[in-house]
Amino acid sequence: GPNEHQLPSVPVRKRVAIFLWKLATGIEYRTISHLSGVGLSTVFNCVQDFCDSVIKVLLPQHITTPDAAKLVEIATFFHNRWRIPQCVGAIDGSHIPIIAPEEYPRDNFNRKGWHSIILQGVVDGRGLFWDVCVGYAGSVHDAQRECVMSAKAVTFMGATK
């Protein structure tokens, strides 16, 4: 049978409109379902599929891990502009508020007392992102997250003994 995420009966224009409606207003899926005349699961799938497509197609075009030459260029810029030697990125994270999921809500309960997922980003000396990691549960401590910076540390700094 057809994959439920292909949404063959919903025209592409309507799928994009549903996604943009959700993105622009933040209103509940149920409200968009009622206003657009499609089922609740269809609205959810439209939003999810659009996000998946952006991640699959656009993310690799705009956010890439720098190669060795680019890292040297970034480090040189950081040193010349900001007087920070041997720096290839400024990293920070933020808790993004979410509605508590029905399944395992405590996983997303952060130390600040509310439900969230974590967004972490790395920028070069000009403030351009070269790594973004989103989706870890709000309860996950900084030291436990494994985004590109920690996963590629050997590439950036060389193997340690």
Image (cartoon, grey):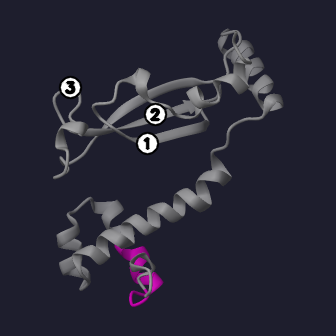
In the rendered structure, are the residues bearing label 3 and label 1 in contact, judged by CB atoms less than 8 Å apart? no
Q: Residue at x 59, y 37 (%)?
A: 129
Q: Residue at x 18, y 43 (%)?
A: 105
- Identify the mark nearer the N-term, 2 or 3: 3
Figure quadrant of residue 72:
top right
Front-most of residues 142 and 16? 142
**Residue for badge 3:** 112
Q: Judge whether 148 appears above or below 16 on screen.
A: above
Q: Is residue 140 magenta?
A: no
- Where does the N terminus fall, quadrant-wise? bottom left
Q: Judge whether 73 appears above or below 83 on screen.
A: below
Q: Residues within 10 Å of mark 3 (few under 14, many from 20)?
A: few
Residue 117 shown left or right of residue 11 in the figure = left
Q: Judge whether 160 appears above or below 41 on screen.
A: above
**Residue for badge 1:** 134
**Residue for badge 2:** 120
The kind of residue on which mark 3 rests is Lys
Q: Which portion, as a residue range, is magenta?
A: 8-18
Secondary element type, mark 3 = loop
Residue 134 in picture, x, y percent from top left: 43, 42
Q: Is residue 12 magenta?
A: yes
In the rendered structure, are the residues bearing label 2 and label 1 in contact, judged by CB atoms less than 8 Å apart? yes
Front-most of residues 42 and 145? 145
- Identify the mark nearer the N-term, 2 or 1: 2
Alpha carbon separation for disc pair 3 and 1: 18 Å
Q: Residue at x 43, y 21 (%)?
A: 143
Alpha carbon separation for disc pair 2 and 1: 6 Å
